Image (cartoon, helix red, strand yellow):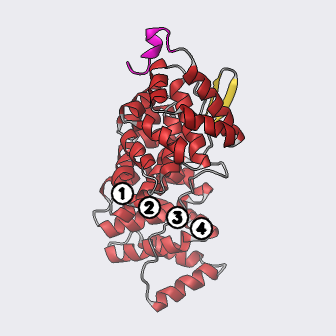
Amino acid sequence: METENGANFTYMGRKFDNMSVNDDSSPFSDCNSDRSGEFQTTSSQSRRLLLACSSENSDDLIRQLVLDLESCSIDEQKQAAMEIRLLAKNNPENRIKIAKAGAIKPLITLISSSDSQLQEYGVTAILNLSLCDENKVAIASSGAIRPLVRALRTGTSTTKENAACALLRLSQLEENKVAIGRSGSIPLLVNLLESGGIRGKKDAATALYSLCSVKENKIRAVDAGIMKPLVELMADFGSNMVDKSSYILSILVVVPEGRKALVEEGGIPVLVEIIEVGTQRQKEIAVGILLQICEDNLMYRAMVAREGAIPPLVALSQSGTNRAKQKSETLIDLLRQPRSGNAATRTADVSV
């Protein structure tokens, strides 16, 4: 049933696909440059940065700022990291220049600083540099992953949000996903998803969606307790997290551990409610999830049927999108099949 990225599955010869993060209709927006507000600068500093950003020859300033990153003065380091962050915020050319000037390694060193503000500036500057595809390999190969994970554990709320975004950007290189997962990031991202502010939750959700395209990271996320906050966020229509949570769930239930955890956390009633009252997109993804968990498990089919899923599924099969209609009809057929069969099949997921 699972494909390479866990996004597609086939039942009775019919192929079903779940939308990916690259789909135009995806609920995930990319983590872009930091959104923590501009640092306060004096008028002379502002003029210097404005001139540097608009000048074709900002190289001299950038070289000096990179030198200042390794200053013995924390204040000079902060000022340099702040200005690098601003220069890289909205200017792709500056991102490349800053990286080529050697800023990446000293910025990574700042991420491990015991000074919380210096750590935040370092994380934010690395995030902005990681927006350039050319810099991602250099950032990861320079050893940024583990310091970013530590910042995700110990930083300010802004630091944690921007560290999550930076890890997302690095995870867009397939070869980094396993390394990021093995670095201890996933339990911290799950914690941010559960207890962070709304921005932190969204950033954590986007990073987790990207990382969990890898099977071993799916299992790490389930083991870290991701299912509880996902189900809670799906059940809260006022959270603006129903779509994001559903999409993450759709890639977790391709593994038995994910299906088992979903049922144990009470996800079936929540999914049935989404089919009843959710948006068209929410209904479609909820049906896809129920199809995944019901395909090989008679016990789960019985639970879904007992929750009253068939009437809203019939309604969706008549009024939904073409994909929603197809998925609804297939799920209805499954739920109406005689509930008998091999006991091993009925309990396959439960015994994992």
Q: Foreground: 205 or 123?
A: 205
Point out the tag, 3 or 2, that comes first from the N-terminus: 3
Location of the N terminus (image quadrant): top right
- Residue pictured at 43% horizontal, 47% vertical: 235
Of all residues, the one furthest to the right in this rendering is 322
Magenta stretch mostly in which secondary structure?
loop
Where is mark 3, residue-wise?
128
Name the kind of residue labelled 4 in the image. Answer: Lys
Above-or-below relation of 192 to 269: below
Name the kind of residue labelled 2 in the image. Answer: Arg
Q: Helix, strand or loop at disc 4?
A: helix
Point out the tag, 1 or 3, that comes first from the N-terminus: 3
State which region is magenta: 339-352
Q: Where is residue 179 in the image (x, y as percent from the top left)?
A: 46, 40
Distance Cα–Cα, label 1 vs label 2: 8 Å
Residue 211 at least partly seen: no
The reply to whether the magenta stretch includes residue 327 is no
Disc 3 + disc 2, Cβ < 8 Å = no
Q: Helix, strand or loop at disc 2?
A: helix
Location of the C terminus (image quadrant): top left
Distance Cα–Cα, label 1 vs label 3: 22 Å
Disc 1 + disc 2, Cβ < 8 Å = yes
- Kindly identify which numbered label has been placed on residue 199: 2
163 left or right, relative to 156: right
- Residue pictured at 62% horizontal, 34% vertical: 314
Quadrant location of residue 8?
Answer: top right
- Kindly identify which numbered label has been placed on residue 274: none
Where is mark 1, residue-wise?
196
